[in-house]
Amino acid sequence: MTVLPLKSLHERDPQPAKQEAKLRVHHVSKIFEQKGQRVTALEDTHFDVREGEFVTILGPSGCGKSTLLKIIAGLTEPSSGYVMLNNQRISGPGADRGMVFQAYTLFPWLTVEENIAFGLKLKGVPKAQRQEIVQHYLDLIGLTGFGAMYPSSLSGGMKQRVAIARALANDPDVLLMDEPFGALDAQTRTVMQELLLQVWEESHKTILFVTHDIDEAIFMGDRVYVMTARPGRLKAEIPIPIPRPREFSVKTTREFMRLKAEILDLIREESWKAANEIRNEDFS
């Protein structure tokens, strides 16, 4: 297994043209002002995501993972640095980025079909075409026949399926996912991981996926970026050489366990740093 330290990430040779970055996070930092104090959430964060890649980001709580995703989504401005998508600098929210949050963000007054079609309707997509797209994603996420139901009638896993379908229906260039399965029970989470991989195999959408779960990061990703404790920086880039398509049974293989042990060491070190920082703040 190859673990690339932060220095290597910054100094590696440019990628060939055919592997040019789809998404580029260029030396991004974020400082928040809170009650007269400056809190650095992100510091000099720099990485690329290529077309069709599934990249996962791991880090201890409070390391700036969600802040990073919000900057990429255009929901938060960086204090320094910038983000580029398709060689265009991001300056705010846009339809070229889809976002799926941990919290269920469906419109409760709309049916499943209407939720999925919401963005398409705003774009002015004709009704017949909207219905065709919605049905495609209902079939893809395994909710055929549930289109007329309201979110209040759905389980947590089903709600997240609809949220994923709604994001994909708009055909974004990149899908940003902020711990989308974090609120689900273990069994449902496992099913959702496999379902998302099946959807990705079908669409090959570029995905940047934030999680705190090591197994999830390895199982889902082509590469795993490990972040440091606050202020968040990239500590390591870990390629995942496990062949695709992947099934749940891959989590019991020797290769998977070796990757998990390596990443666990990296995360454990940063988690202790984060815990000590909180302890010091409590006693300061």
Image (cartoon, helix red, strand yellow):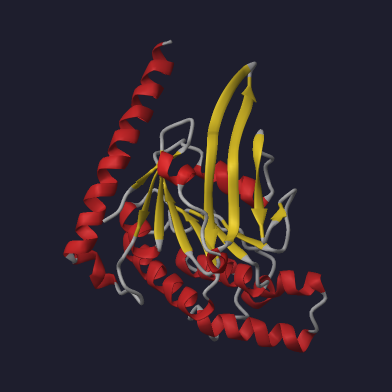
Residue 98 position in % (x across, y down): 63, 62
Residue 282 position in % (x across, y down): 41, 16
| Quadrant of the frame with the N terminus | bottom left
Residue 10 position in % (x across, y down): 48, 43
Residue drawn at point x = 60 percent, y = 63 percent = 174
Q: On the rendered structure, is 122 left or right of 211?
A: right
Q: Residue furthest top?
A: 284
Residue drawn at point x = 19 percent, y = 66 percent = 253
| Quadrant of the frame with the C terminus | top left
Residue drawn at point x = 62 percent, y = 67 percent = 167
Occupied quadrant, residue 119: bottom right
Q: Is residue 265 visible?
A: yes
Q: Is residue 146 visible?
A: no
Q: Nearer the viewer, residue 107 or 228?
A: 228
Q: Residue furthest right?
A: 124
Vertical arrangement, residue 127 with respect to residue 227, above or below? below
